[in-house]
Amino acid sequence: MRLTAKSEYGLLAVIDLACSFGSGPVSAREIAERREIPPRFLEQLFVALRRGGVVSAVRGARGGFVLTRDPAQITVLEVVESLEGSLETSVCDSERSSGCARSGACAAAPVWAKATAALRDVFATTSIAELAGNQQIMDASAPGKR
């Protein structure tokens, strides 16, 4: 399991879109400025988020990005897995265990599996709408933001 800056920045961008849900497309430039995300990196993240079915692009002068569904129907897990791939233990995942010399003889394997399951559960039960609500409260109390 590996979470990188892709997850952090991608989640911030999706939360930003959720805060504007129903108001039309939001440009990547606006999101990059508001959330302090490097613009070129954000463009790469939107490619992965589009492939994952989380966002869609709207072309034209007033184009930008929109969520594909209501933010309450999108989970953090969906966003993270669109950006990082499937969340599995990095040490004992199913692909590596067959080639691992310690496969079947590693006392730590169940701990890694539990940790991954717990993380997946938290991500799967947290909606983007929930995070967007929190973000709107924070943005409203921060002078000069959004």
Image (cartoon, rainbow, N blue to C red):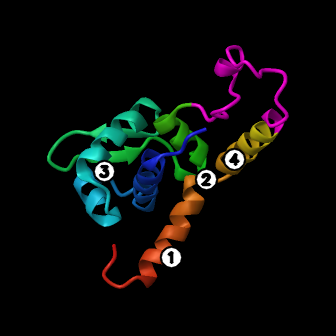
Q: Quadrant of the C terminus?
A: bottom left
Amino acid on which disc 2 is placed = Ser
Q: Secondary structure at mark 4?
A: helix
Q: Residue furthest top?
A: 98
Magenta region: which residues? 86-110
Q: Residues within 10 Å of mark 1 (few under 14, many from 20)?
A: few
- Amino acid type, callout 1: Ile
Nearer to the camera, 4 or 59: 4
Residue 25: mark in rendering? 3
Alpha carbon distance from label 4 to label 1: 25 Å
| Mark 4 or 1, nearer chain start | 4
Q: Earlier in the sequence, mark 3 or mark 4?
A: 3
Q: Main secondary structure of the magenta part?
A: loop
Disc 1, SS: helix
Mark positioned earlier in the residue sequence (3 or 1): 3
Residue 100: image x %, image y %? Answer: 70, 19
Residue 106 in the figure: left or right of residue 14: right
Compared with 78, 9 (above or below) is: below
